[in-house]
Image (spheres, rainbow, N blue to C red):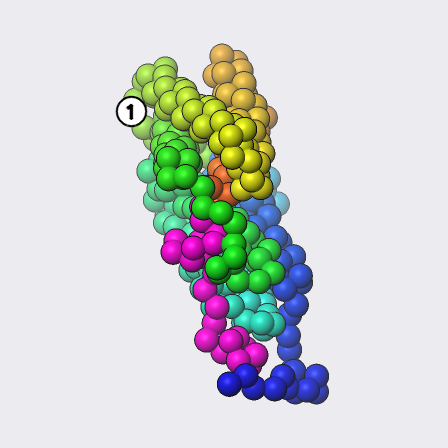
């Protein structure tokens, strides 16, 4: 039985779906910002600008008048702002009308991820920028960015896509999309190995991975080439599907694939130029930004390839029990 909606006077707090979508977008781009500021800490050699955590130095919460100290401390301030953004997403998902359980859980996942990242950041400082820890810190940030993309995507749904949703794309298309996403993760990991071997460790005294830089760079390049091949194969399959069957789903996926290919092309160009010019700081920073954009666009590609109509995959709409009766307050 459907219960009557409470009067406006009974609504202490509520968030419209449109407002929640804006908050989810803020959470996403705040997580992107922390990736960029974190890379600046490393590239300016400020990784040990603060030698302690959570204080900057023993007995000193803020750094003295020191460039490296303020770069590192500034990154911590941005982390605080990111924490506010993801907590706001949780609160907004709880007060959203109608409330949806899937949005609450994805928002809580962002908070858990940020807490994990804060702890990992402390370990990074206390282990004096150990390359494996720094690599894990970056990869965890990419997982968080991807989760934020999913939250923003789900927040854009106006109604449950159950029963009358978009037609399910063929299995081979969805499999190729997930293969491309897996290869993207592999390319990001091999990229962190190159970074851990290269000269930009966050401090000139930090020990680097004991690999030959040309060798790990070559492995990273091969991984990226395989990723490009898989993405182009997916593009070919989707183009044929759009030509033979048509449909909005195939057209939307085709646009997503073209965006990914564009990002990959720019990333490859930056990668080669930076390698053959001894890794200048500006190009390395742009490469980090490009890696994060690749995470965003590839996640959106997988979302476009995934089912929205059958309600049988992990991207499906999951309403909160209270929202069915109109009482999700």
The x, y position of residue 191, in whole percent, is 41, 29
Which SS class for mark 1? loop
The x, y position of residue 200, in whole percent, is 46, 28
Is residue 64 in view?
Answer: no
Q: Which residue is drawn at 46% across and 34% down?
A: 202
Q: Residue at x 33, y 38 (%)?
A: 132
Q: Which of 255 and 79 is in front in this view?
A: 255
Q: Which residue is drawn at 58% across and 41% down?
A: 248
Which region shows up in magenta? Answer: 306-329
Q: Is residue 42 above or below residue 126?
A: above
- Decide whether residue 267 is among the magenta residues: no
In the image, taking residue 22 as reference, residue 234 lies left or right, namely left
Q: Is residue 179 above or below residue 163?
A: above
Is residue 258 in view?
Answer: yes
In the image, taking residue 141 as reference, residue 289 lies left or right, namely right
- Mark 1 burial class by Cα count in 10 Å: few <14, some 14-19, many 20+: few
Please give the residue where the numbered disc 1 appears in the rendered image: 210
């Amino acid at each position: 039985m459907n219960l009557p909606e409470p009067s406006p006077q009974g609504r202490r707090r509520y968030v419209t779906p449109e407002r929640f979508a804006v908050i989810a977008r803020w959470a996403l781009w705040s997580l992107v910002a922390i990736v960029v500021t974190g890379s600046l800490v490393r590239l300016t050699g400020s990784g040990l600008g603060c030698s302690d955590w959570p204080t900057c130095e023993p007995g000193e919460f803020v750094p003295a008048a020191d460039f490296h100290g303020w770069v590192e401390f500034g990154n911590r301030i941005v982390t605080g702002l990111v924490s506010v953004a993801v907590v706001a997403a949780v609160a907004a998902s709880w007060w959203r009308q109608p409330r949806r359980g899937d949005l609450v859980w994805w928002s809580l996942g962002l908070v858990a991820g940020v807490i994990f990242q804060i702890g990992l950041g402390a370990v990074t400082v206390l282990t004096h920028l150990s390359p494996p820890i720094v690599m894990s810190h970056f990869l965890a940030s990419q997982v968080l960015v991807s989760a934020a993309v999913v939250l923003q995507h789900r927040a854009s749904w106006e109604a449950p896509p159950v029963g009358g949703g978009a037609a399910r794309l063929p299995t081979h298309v969805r499999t190729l999309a997930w293969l491309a996403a897996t290869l993207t993760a592999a390319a990001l990991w091999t990229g962190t190995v190159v970074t851990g071997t290269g000269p930009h460790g966050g401090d000139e005294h930090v020990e680097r991975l004991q690999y030959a830089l040309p060798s790990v760079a070559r492995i990273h390049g091969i991984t990226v080439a395989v990723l490009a091949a898989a993405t182009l194969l997916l593009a070919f399959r989707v183009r044929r599907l759009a030509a033979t069957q048509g449909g909005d789903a195939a057209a939307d996926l085709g646009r997503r694939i073209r965006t990914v290919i564009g990002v990959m092309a720019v990333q490859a160009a930056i990668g080669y130029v930076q390698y053959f010019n001894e890794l200048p700081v500006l190009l390395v920073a742009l490469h980090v930004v490009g890696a994060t954009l690749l995470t965003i666009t590839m996640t959106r590609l997988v979302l476009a390839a995934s089912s929205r109509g059958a309600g049988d995959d992990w991207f499906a709409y999951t309403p909160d029990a209270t929202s069915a009766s109109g009482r999700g307050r």
